[in-house]
């Protein structure tokens, strides 16, 4: 898989003043977001379902190669699910768990950035068809991942549970409701919350700086509804940090997204993991078709101000087009309008972005 982003900006005077305060100079740029090599398969000599996966990725931000989701999945039909052992998505938030190449929006919402994208440990994920309930439980530590960019916690426990009262794949009808919880110990008793404005080539514009935290919890909720080619969803999250000899801190945010596939495709839903999958393409542009064309509008905000921490708040509205030219090739055309509330100023910025994405699976 490969993702490449081009971003350009239009800034008002106040926003430029804020960038001066941050010692940043936003310039048009193309950047490789990531390049990844994946492998997977099943061990057929075992009666029980056992599968493996391996992923190795070049991170365009850190300019390093790293191991991504890698490990074993073991079927546990006795518990209506599977157990994964290895490096994986920890299980908090549908959008965070989904394959990064299958998202509705160009980037995940800012409000879930404090959740590590990966963790090393063990995870159970199961779905109970009769009750239509699902459950993900995970336990992780940083024994192998300490020092890597995604590892911000010494250990964490994660739970995600929900209900799917409506799931008619033939008619493309879905209602998904879930809650998320995480409890962990920050590395070395310190933590930093920061977020990019849902634009990967853009630097972090809101940032708490480092503060003391002995333990942390994250609490969130998600709801997603699909009817045919129409999808609407929302997630909210609050991240709480507790210290022994200083202030506790709380940071909250959320988003809402609406998407419509004009060419008629339906976004699939998978009860193994309880996530959306890749948009199916009926006829690619290279075979005389249009592929699939989707219009999306996304509203998102994240507030990093609390007590004596003034990390700022960023709010962004993003109309965009996803053009799935083939089942492996996706082109995004994105506009974003952002408001940065920081340094007792409110600055405004326009993002003009495009992304090319190749996914061969």
Image: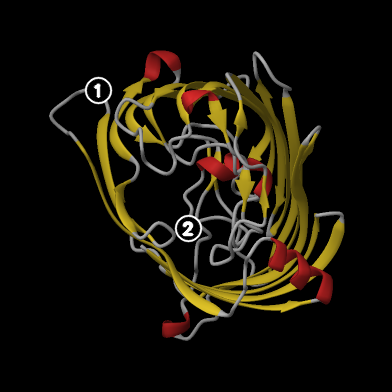
Q: Which label was assigned to residue 6?
A: none
Instruction: Bin the neighbour count of mark 1 within 10 Å (Cα to Cα): few under 14, some 14-19, many 20 and up.
Output: few
Q: Is residue 99 left or right of residue 209?
A: left
Q: Is residue 68 visible?
A: yes
Residue 237 image position (x, y, % from top left): 71, 35
Q: Identify the residue at image location x=67%, y=30%.
A: 178
Give the mark, 2 or 1, whose residue is nearer the N terminus: 1
Q: Is residue 15 above or below residue 306?
A: below
Disc 2 is placed on an element classified as loop
Q: Residue furthest left?
A: 45
Q: Are marks 2 and 1 in contact (CB under 8 Å)?
A: no
Q: Is residue 189 left or right of residue 207?
A: left
Q: How is this picture coloured?
A: secondary structure
Rendered image quadrant of residue 41: top left
Q: Identify the residue at image location x=47%, y=86%.
A: 288
Residue 199 image position (x, y, % from top left): 60, 63
Closest to the observer, 264 or 125: 125
Q: Identify the residue at image location x=63%, y=42%.
A: 209
Q: Is residue 269 left or right of residue 234?
A: left
Give the Cα separation between the discs numbered 2 and 1.
30 Å
Q: Nearer the viewer, mark 2 or mark 1?
A: 2
Closest to the observer, 27 or 23: 23
Q: Which label was assigned to residue 101?
A: 2
Rendered image quadrant of residue 360: bottom left
Q: Which residue is mark 1?
A: 48
Q: Is residue 279 left or right of residue 309?
A: left
Q: Is residue 21 above or below residue 170?
A: below
Residue 230 image position (x, y, % from top left): 72, 57
Residue 326 image position (x, y, % from top left): 45, 73
């Amino acid at each position: 898989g490969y993702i490449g982003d081009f971003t350009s900006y239009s800034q008002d005077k106040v926003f430029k003043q804020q960038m001066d305060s941050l010692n940043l100079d936003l310039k048009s740029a193309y950047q490789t977001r990531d390049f990844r090599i994946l492998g997977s398969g099943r061990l057929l000599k075992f009666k029980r379902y056992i599968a493996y996966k391996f992923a190795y990725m070049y991170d365009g931000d850190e300019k390093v190669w790293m191991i991504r989701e890698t490990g074993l999945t073991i079927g546990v039909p006795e518990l209506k699910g599977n157990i994964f052992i290895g490096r994986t998505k920890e299980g908090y938030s549908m959008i965070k768990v989904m394959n990064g190449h299958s998202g509705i929006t160009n980037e995940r919402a800012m409000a879930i950035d404090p959740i590590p994208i990966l963790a090393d440990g063990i995870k159970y994920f199961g779905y109970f068809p009769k009750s239509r309930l699902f459950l993900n439980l995970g336990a992780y530590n940083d024994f192998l991942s300490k020092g890597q960019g995604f590892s911000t916690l010494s250990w964490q426990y994660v739970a995600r549970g929900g209900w799917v009262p409506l799931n008619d794949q033939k008619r493309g009808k879905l209602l998904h409701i879930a809650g998320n919880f995480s409890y962990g110990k920050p590395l070395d008793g310190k933590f930093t919350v920061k977020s990019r404005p849902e634009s990967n080539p853009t630097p972090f514009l809101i940032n708490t700086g480092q503060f003391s935290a002995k333990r942390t919890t994250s609490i969130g909720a998600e709801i997603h509804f699909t009817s045919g080619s129409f999808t609407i969803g929302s997630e909210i999250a609050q991240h709480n940090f507790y210290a022994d000899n200083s202030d506790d801190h709380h940071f909250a945010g959320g988003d809402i997204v609406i998407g419509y596939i004009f060419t008629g495709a339906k976004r699939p839903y998978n009860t193994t993991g309880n996530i959306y999958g890749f948009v199916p393409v009926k006829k690619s542009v290279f075979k005389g078709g249009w592929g699939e064309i989707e219009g999306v509008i996304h509203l998102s905000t994240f507030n990093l101000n609390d007590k004596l921490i003034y990390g700022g708040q960023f709010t962004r509205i993003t109309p965009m087009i996803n053009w799935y030219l083939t089942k492996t090739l996706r082109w995004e055309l994105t506009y974003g309008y952002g408001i940065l509330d920081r340094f007792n100023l409110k600055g405004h910025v326009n993002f003009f972005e495009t992304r090319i994405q190749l996914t061969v699976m």
